[in-house]
Image: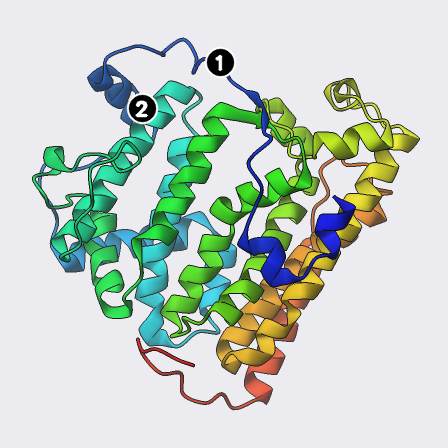
Amino acid sequence: MANASKTGCAAAVGKYPDSTIVGARSDTGQWAGRPLRDLLAEGWRRLPAAYRIPPEAPALEEAEAYCARLARGHYENFSVATWFLPKRLHQHFFNVYAYCRISDDLGDEVGEPAISLALLDRWEEELNAMYASLGESFPPSRQQPDISRTGGRPRHPVFIALGETVRQFAIPRQEFADLLTAFRQDQTVTRYQSFDDVLGYCHNSANPVGRLVLYLCGYRDPERQQLSDCTCTALQLANFWQDVSVDYLKGRIYLPLDDMRRFGVPEQTIAERRTTPEFLSLMKYEVEVARDWFARGLPLAAKVDRELALDIELFTRGGQEILNAIEQQGYDVLKSRPVISKGRKLALVAGALWRRFRQRSPETPSAGVRP
């Protein structure tokens, strides 16, 4: 891990060795082997009714309203972030957020791996149908579910609205598909041997989100994407270290096993929530590594428009505050989950607002290719 943390940003996020992931589930729960129809029916039953794929596709206006309601109702920080973006981009951010939100819930809110995997496959059929309706075709493969059940056209409101966003901003399918890869991985992998393996997970679970934001703001170049990857990886690591106990209750450990072994931390320590000097040393080390990844991504803010720079700053500072909260409670994340106080959150937003109104931002171009 130490070597990985010292490599350059572009090299670190660009390629990974063959995975040495351990802890893969040998089955996918008591629902494994059930008919697909039963898996899907049970899965939709366990989720909000609004998530279900309707028999008929809604009109674009109705689909966009659906995405806006979902974005505004599920995540208050997302609504705050959109304050700093041009109003003409709000709906597109709602559309992307709705896709990410439901995708995440299909993987994390069902409680049965086999059911989640079936739902994620069905969701990807809608994704493929959306791209097919825009003129993109796919060679047959196991990783790209058949779109025959969709009739070649998406029906879910998210994909009706998202299709317009993809068309306007020429967003490639891969970023959306990579997120589904991560959510599938959560159903089948519970431990990660090395830090490179954790980075490989972040490559699919976090980095696509930053790249989608860049596409919406008109940036498509590798330099900015690589800097964004560093920031998103850092945010993912901060969340992992904040949620060690929460993730363990879900059967997952994202702390690299190599690091746990090097610091003398057996899994039983996490299972029993037993704070030891070895565990605290491990967490102190992981916090510093996450801070290093935030530092690598900092140059991005100077390479984008001020409006987007304020968003980047807000999320970066929020992630850094999580790490500060871990440090302030002595790196003991087993006894209580570190959180940012409401007062500190308000201070972060107030600071960003002050900078927003202090600087007159240049007009952000629409969906175009930037240098």
On-image quarter of the C terminus? bottom left
Asked whether the viewer can see residue 346, the reply is: no
Mark 1 Cα within 10 Å, few/some/many (few <14, many 20+)? few
Residue behind mark 2: 43
Q: Position of residue 221 (x, y in %)?
A: 44, 72
Q: Position of residue 138 (x, y in %)?
A: 20, 46
- Give the residue at x 55% y 79%: 303
- Left or right position of 201 against 98: right
Say which amino acid is labelled 1.
Ser
- Of the numbered discs 2 and 1, the one sitting upstream in the chain is 1
The coloring applied to the image is: rainbow
Asked whether the viewer can see residue 326, the reply is: yes
Residue sitting farthest toward the front? 18
Among the 4 quarters of the image, the one containing residue 348: bottom right
Q: Position of residue 334 (x, y in %)?
A: 76, 31
- Left or right position of 305 against 336: left
Q: Nearer the viewer, residue 58 or 365?
A: 365
Position above or below: 280 against 133: above
Say which amino acid is labelled 2.
Gly
- Give the residue at x 31% y 78%: 368
- How far apart marks 2 and 1 lie (CA) works out to 21 Å
Judged by depth in the image, the label closer to the viewer, 2 or 1, is 1
Secondary structure under the numbered disc 1 in the rendered image: loop
Position above or below: 83 against 35: below
- Give the residue at x 67% y 48%: 238
- Give the residue at x 24% y 15%: 38
Mark 2 Cα within 10 Å, few/some/many (few <14, many 20+)? many
Residue behind mark 1: 26
Among the 4 quarters of the image, the one containing residue 40: top left
Among the 4 quarters of the image, the one containing residue 242: top right
